Image (cartoon, grey):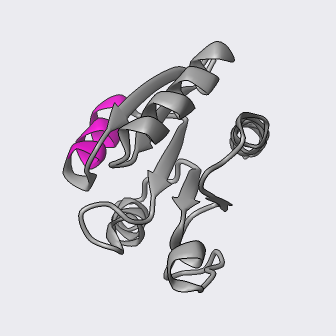
Amino acid sequence: MAKIVIIDDDPDILDASSLVLNSKGHEVITATNPEDGYRLVKDNSPDLIILDVMMNEPDDGFFLAQKFRREKITVPILMYSSVSKTVGMSFGVNELVPVDDFVEKPISPSLLVEKVEHLLQLRKEK
């Protein structure tokens, strides 16, 4: 199946997401900070990146997504967000937020699988 990198500073989210995706046959590699996540993506050429918005800094995820796109890393990015609940704002996909889809945390296992499978299918079609 697919190789997926998850970058999130919440160990519970990493564990739960990994468990769900591993159960569907995917290989999951995790990082708890943007620096390690960046290296994992560069070293492992994943099929999908799942990226949290807020880690060490409130906008780490946005900056890391921008960095991936500047470096021509075109792998689909699914962004985990709790920003709208935290600050009452919502974000859409645009040039400042160069990701392929957003999901609000906490995410149900079925929605996670649905989003991941959809993005992987889009990647195959390109």
Residue 14: name its quadrant.
top left
Q: How many marks?
A: 0
Residue 93 lies, in percent from the top left, at: 64, 74
Task: Residue 35: tell me if it is visible.
Answer: yes
Q: Does residue 25 show up?
A: no
**Above or below, comparing residue 108 to residue 63 in the picture:** above
Residue at 54% over, 63% down: 81
In this picture, residue 118 sits left or right of residue 89? right
Q: Is residue 95 left or right of residue 102?
A: left
Question: Horizontal and vertical percent for residue 47?
Answer: 55, 35
Q: Is residue 68 above or below residue 29?
A: below
Q: Quadrant of the N terminus?
A: top right
As for residue 71 lying within the magenta part, the answer is: no
**Which residue: 28% across, 33% down?**
43
Closer-to-camera residue (113/89): 89
Q: Pick whichever, 49 or 68, lies toward us.
A: 49
| Pick the front one: 108 or 98 | 108
Q: Which residues are magenta?
A: 36-44
Q: Is residue 84 above or below residue 51?
A: below
Q: Is 71 left or right of 93, judged from the image as shown?
A: left
Q: Residue 101's x, y, as percent?
A: 67, 60
**Magenta stretch, overall SS:** helix
Q: Which residue appears at 77% of the width and 43% of the height?
A: 111
Tell me where residue 25 sits by quadrant.
top right
In the rendering, at what x and y percent does residue 124 appear?
72, 36
